[in-house]
């Protein structure tokens, strides 16, 4: 693969252009690498402290009793954003598995069959939630099953 870098003061923000005759796995990986700009998320640790979280710090986002709770490795944070807003902000690394839950795909630990066609997903920090039947086809597609 050829690589060309053009440095000029006329460019205010870096951007990449890929010339190819077809999209290969290598091209797809490059696009993922270039587009994986992590946008920080602001959350409340308690009523006074505002914390800046990177998407890689987030294991799961869940709506509980009307509050959006962000689960990290060891702590929980509250966000004022709605689930769909966080889903858009967090990007491809996250997948919605139920009406109220987003998970970071990087932190999946194991999956167990659940009741009524659902699956129980366990994360590396000990959190778990069910993949609902509505979101199951997309989840299975991601897993390749």
Image (cartoon, grey):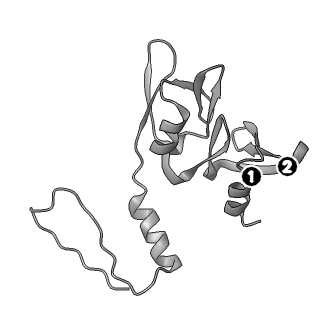
In this rendered view, identify the residue nearer to me: 122 or 138: 138
Question: What label sits on residue 97 in the rendered view?
Answer: none
Q: Is residue 11 above or below residue 85?
A: below
* Left or right side of 124 for 118: right
In this rendered view, identify the residue nearer to me: 140 or 42: 140
Quarter of the N terminus within the rendering: bottom left
Residue highlighted by disc 1: 136
Quadrant of res 49 = top left
Disc 1 packing (10 Å; few <14; some 14–19; many ≥20): some
Q: Which residue is drawn at 53% across and 77% down?
A: 25
Q: Residue at x 45, y 76 (%)?
A: 27
Q: Is residue 44 above or below residue 2?
A: above
Foreground label between 2 and 1: 1
Where residue 34 sits in the image (x, y, percent)?
A: 39, 63
Where residue 41 sits in the image (x, y, percent)?
A: 44, 35
Q: Which residue is drawn at 44% across and 26% down?
A: 51
Q: Which residue is drawn at 25% across and 79% down?
A: 4
Residue projecting furthest to the top: 47
Residue highlighted by disc 2: 112
Disc 2 packing (10 Å; few <14; some 14–19; many ≥20): few
Where residue 5 sits in the image (x, y, percent)?
A: 23, 74
* Dot 2 or dot 1, earlier in sequence: 2
Helix, strand or loop status at disc 2: strand
Where residue 99 sits in the image (x, y, percent)?
A: 67, 37
Q: How far apart are marks 2 and 1 (CA)?
A: 13 Å
* Left or right side of 26 for 2: left
Asked if labels 1 and 2 touch by Cβ distance under 8 angstroms, the answer is no
Helix, strand or loop status at disc 1: helix
* Left or right side of 82 for 110: right
Total label count? 2
């Amino acid at each position: 693969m050829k690589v060309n870098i053009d440095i000029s003061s006329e460019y205010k923000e870096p951007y990449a252009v890929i010339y190819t005759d077809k999209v290969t796995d290598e091209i797809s990986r490059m696009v993922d690498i270039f587009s994986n700009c992590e946008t920080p998320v602001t959350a409340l640790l308690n009523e006074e402290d505002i914390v800046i979280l990177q998407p890689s710090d987030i294991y799961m986002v869940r709506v509980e009793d009307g509050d959006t709770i962000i689960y990290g490795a060891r702590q929980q944070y509250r966000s004022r954003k709605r689930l769909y807003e966080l889903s858009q902000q967090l990007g491809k690394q996250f997948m919605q598995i139920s009406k109220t839950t987003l998970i970071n795909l990087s932190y999946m630990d194991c999956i167990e069959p659940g009741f009524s066609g659902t699956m129980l997903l366990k994360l590396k920090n000990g959190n778990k939630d069910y993949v609902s039947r509505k979101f199951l086809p997309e989840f299975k597609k991601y897993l390749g099953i």
